[in-house]
Image (cartoon, rainbow, N blue to C red):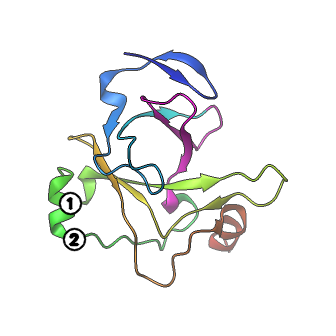
Amino acid sequence: MRIQTKIMGELDVDERQIIDIPDGLIGFKKFTSYALLDAPQKPYFYLQSTELAELGFILLDPFLFRPDYSVDVADAAMGSLGIAGPDDALVLTLVTVPSDGGPVTANLMGPLIIGRKARRGAQIILSDPRWLTKHDVMAELAASRK
């Protein structure tokens, strides 16, 4: 499948990279089809809308900088994503890279959960007070290595 991306131009993507997010992402409910791509800078990923070239998000595995991160998702939600157990789930956080050179932050309150086999995802909101919408990735990475 050929898609147009905001930062990488036109790309051929494998159908296995297409993720259906039936309820969309917060603030972008009408866009439900995305391609999950490796970003040019590791360890980041890029979530590109297949419906609007200008809509893309940077993602990061939260366990890389917060090994204590935990996601409590209702069984019904897990089932709707085709997730039978923890190994079936891919957990990613949306990342903000400020244009003013400020710290790169990750939204740990609203992670994206993807069922690996079904390729269905949902952005969920966690109620755990430890997880905020802006976690400084580099500061937390440094703290986790102490």
Q: Position of residue 121 (x, y in %)?
A: 31, 49
Q: Answer yes or no: is residue 113 visible.
A: yes
Q: Residue at the location (45% across, 65% down)?
A: 110
- Which quadrant of the rendered structure holds the N terminus? top left
Inspect the magenta stretch and tell me whether residue 140 lies in it.
Answer: no
What label sits on residue 78 in the rendered view?
A: 1
Q: Position of residue 123 (x, y in %)?
A: 38, 58
Q: Residue at the location (58% across, 34% down)?
A: 39
Q: Position of residue 108 (x, y in %)?
A: 51, 67
Q: Secondary structure at mark 2?
A: loop
Q: Is residue 67 above or below residue 25?
A: below
Name the image quarter holding residue 86: bottom left
- Which quadrant of the rendered structure holds the C terminus? bottom right
| Residue where numbered disc 2 is placed | 74
Q: The magenta stretch spans which residues?
A: 40-63
Q: Secondary structure at mark 1?
A: helix
Q: Residue furthest bottom?
A: 129
Inspect the magenta stretch and tell me whether residue 58 lies in it.
Answer: yes
